[in-house]
Amino acid sequence: MPKINRRNFIKLSSATAALTATPSIIRAQEASSFEARVIVVGGGFAGATAAKYLRLWGQGKIHVTLVDKNPNHVSCVLSNLILNDRLQIDDITLPYTPLEDNYGVIVEQGLVTSVTGSSVKTVELNGGTKTLTCDYVVLAPGIEFIDIPGLKDENGNNFDTIPHAWISGERTNSGQGQTQTELLREQLHAMPNNGNGVFVMTVPQSPYRCPPGPYERACVVADYLKNNKGGGTVYVLDPHADITIERETFKSAFEGLYADIIIYVPNAELIEVKASSRTAITSEGTFSGDVLNVIPTHKAGKIVETLGLTVGNWAPVDVRSYESTISDKSGFYIIGDSNNSGQPKSGHMANAQAKVCADAIIRTIASKSSSTNLVNDANRLANLKTNSACYSPITYDEASWLSAVFAYDTTKNAMTLVSESFGSSNEPHWSNDNFEDMFEWSRSLFSNTFR
């Protein structure tokens, strides 16, 4: 593995690097002999990639239906750039039409509420208004939030005054077509112009979606206040003892670039929220602001929990295929943020896991007419790798980067970090070049997933 520098990172972070062993042997020897039906639940980076590559690698022999409650996907990748007007919500809205037109994926808009059956599964949408049948189910619903006292009203809805903006496409309760991310932008822009505004935000307990994301958001907000509001204060309330990722980068930004704006508070476990006064009560004190951005601690998507596929907050999986390891749940695969694979919960990693999963499902189908288990083929496992890559905007036009490769460890039956592959931007921690590269990387990821 070469030493990670900026040039190698650009090569590594292309989404096509996610799987080193594609199922060409299956295409050549087995593809003509099988038919199967797969339903993919959730159309984010994990689900859309799985649907695309099941069709692409399966050479049309696998019938694939993608089900999502939304008509398109709004990316969490780059979403913090909505807050400072670098991007608009349309710029990160990704339609499913190319998956239909280019690969023959059937797209159904609806909410999956139950799955019954064993070898043949019945998938129920919207409480039974429609049912679909399949042989395999791939679950990629993303995340749900663990409840925080005071954050919801009597109807169980989050107060719109306290947006999380951590599920970019999620709409506010008041409607009007506004997303959580757009609401947080509106609140930020409405802060006082005299440099006395206060922005309070919380970091969720690990593991959570997009590890650098909260610290990145603090930088984007601080930069906006510095350049548009005459300054202000950003409280970063972190339940961890220290910054969890890219420590040197974010520490340099917090204590240097934004030393007069960002106040980082470690060990601040969120206990309760007072929505009416935008107040967060934590183990390290009480904090109120003009804006309160609470990002609750995460757990697996609701349907994963409903189907009994979780242990604790997450779904245990066999990383050779991402099939559930719960004994009576064969044919269920969980990819992306909802599983407990020990890999980062990021869009890039979701794309990588989806390819491994698609490959494994094709091999599982082919194994039914083969004398060997093609999923556990020694050559496949020896080359089984995933990678996670991301950029973090630090100022209006500068960014940092981070990347890591994971490889299958046969002794542990786990994906483990390849230590020499871990890389991040060195001094200077952020640059204009990195900012430009961020868009090249995101275009590659978006295209590899949705087009």
Image (cartoon, rainbow, N blue to C red):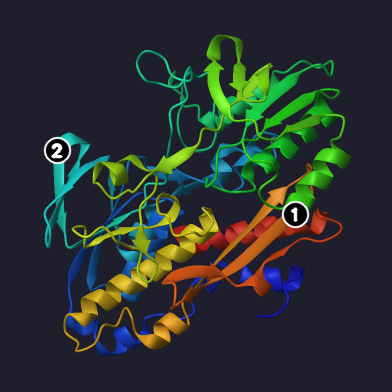
Report the residue at 32% width, 68% height from top.
54
Which one is closest to the eye, mark 1 or mark 2?
A: 1
Report the residue at 26% width, 90% height from top.
29
Q: Can residue 451 be spotted in the picture?
A: no
**Mark 2 belongs to which amino acid?**
Gly
x, y percent for residue 331: 22, 62
Give the left or right position of residue 130, taking residue 137 as reference. Answer: left
- Please tell me how crowded label 2 is: few (under 14), some (14-19), or many (20+) other residues with Cα within 10 Å: few
* Residue nearer the viewer, 444 or 145: 145
Give the left or right position of residue 112, taking residue 83 as reference. Answer: left
Q: CA distance from mark 1 to mark 2?
A: 47 Å
**Mark 1 belongs to which amino acid?**
Ser
* Residue nearer the viewer, 406 or 110: 406
* Residue nearer the viewer, 196 or 339: 339
Mark 1 lies on residue: 400
Where on the picture, by quarter, is residue 91? top right
x, y percent for residue 404: 62, 66
In the rendered view, would you say 223 is above or below 277? below
Give the left or right position of residue 256, taking residue 206 as reference. Answer: right
Q: Of label 1 and label 2, which has the lower sequence position?
A: 2
x, y percent for residue 104: 30, 63
Report the residue at 18% width, 69% height from top.
36
- Please tell me how crowded label 1 is: few (under 14), some (14-19), or many (20+) other residues with Cα within 10 Å: many
* Circle number at residue 128: 2
Q: Can residue 140 be spotted in the picture?
A: yes
In the rendered view, would you say 44 is above or below 427? above
